[in-house]
């Protein structure tokens, strides 16, 4: 499983994890209950690259590397309904025009018109990638590597006093 460290980073050990062990857990603190969701049916093997869960456009999104050939994004259209997983993006790295040297992709934004904004982090220069999957067009913007990047997390105030 994932191991948490003091600096909020964790390590992904794909050699010890099976596909059945991967789930999404939602914790409702007001009711003191948790709910467990299955991942999309199309996610059928553990990748060498850590998958990501985020909230975009008010929906849960799951993105991952597929066999070092594709970047895939699923969106849960109705929170908690596993049958509502919808695949939004399935793009080859060739179409994204990126080199597969040690890297990871982070999903940053989905737009109403179908554009996808990604951050490609590698041993070289990080890049922002804007991908229009309707027209299969890609735009790259290099990012200064003297910036210390951290991943922002959504925050929704949820602790309510009785």
Image: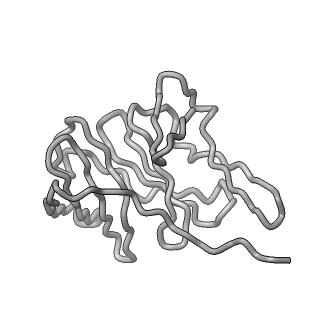
The quarter of the rendered structure image containing the N terminus is top right
Q: Residue 12 versus residue 40: which sits nearer the camera?
A: 12
* Residue positioned 14% across, 59% down in the render: 144
The quarter of the rendered structure image containing the C terminus is bottom right
Give the residue furthest to the front: 6
Vertical relation: 97 (above or below) 75: above
Left-right relation of 32 to 46:
right
Q: Residue 105, how many percent across, how many down?
A: 32, 49
Q: Residue 17, how many percent across, how many down?
A: 55, 27
Give the residue furthest to the top: 15
Give the residue furthest to the right: 162
* Residue positioned 23% across, 66% down in the render: 135
Q: Residue 154, how many percent across, how many down?
A: 51, 67
Rendering colour mode: one colour
Vertical relation: 64 (above or below) 75: above
Q: How many numbered badges does the structure rendering display?
A: 0
Left-right relation of 125 to 4:
left
Q: Residue 158, how many percent across, how many down?
A: 69, 72
* Residue positioned 20% across, 50% down in the render: 95
* Residue positioned 55% across, 67% down in the render: 59
Q: Residue 48 versus residue 156: which sits nearer the camera?
A: 156
């Amino acid at each position: 499983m994932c191991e948490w460290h003091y600096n909020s980073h964790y390590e992904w050990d794909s050699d010890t994890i099976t596909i059945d062990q991967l789930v999404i857990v939602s914790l409702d603190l007001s009711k003191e209950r948790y709910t467990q969701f299955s991942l999309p049916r199309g996610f059928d093997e553990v990748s060498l690259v850590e998958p990501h869960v985020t909230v975009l456009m008010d929906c849960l999104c799951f993105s991952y590397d597929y066999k070092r050939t594709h970047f895939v994004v699923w969106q849960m259209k109705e929170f908690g309904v596993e049958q509502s997983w919808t695949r939004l993006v399935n793009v080859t790295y060739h179409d994204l025009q990126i080199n597969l040297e040690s890297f990871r992709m982070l999903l940053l934004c989905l737009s109403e018109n179908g554009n996808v904004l990604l951050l490609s982090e590698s041993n070289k220069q990080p890049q922002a990638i804007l991908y229009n999957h309707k027209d299969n067009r890609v735009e790259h913007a290099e990012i200064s590597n003297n910036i210390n990047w951290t991943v922002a997390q959504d925050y929704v105030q949820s602790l309510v006093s009785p």
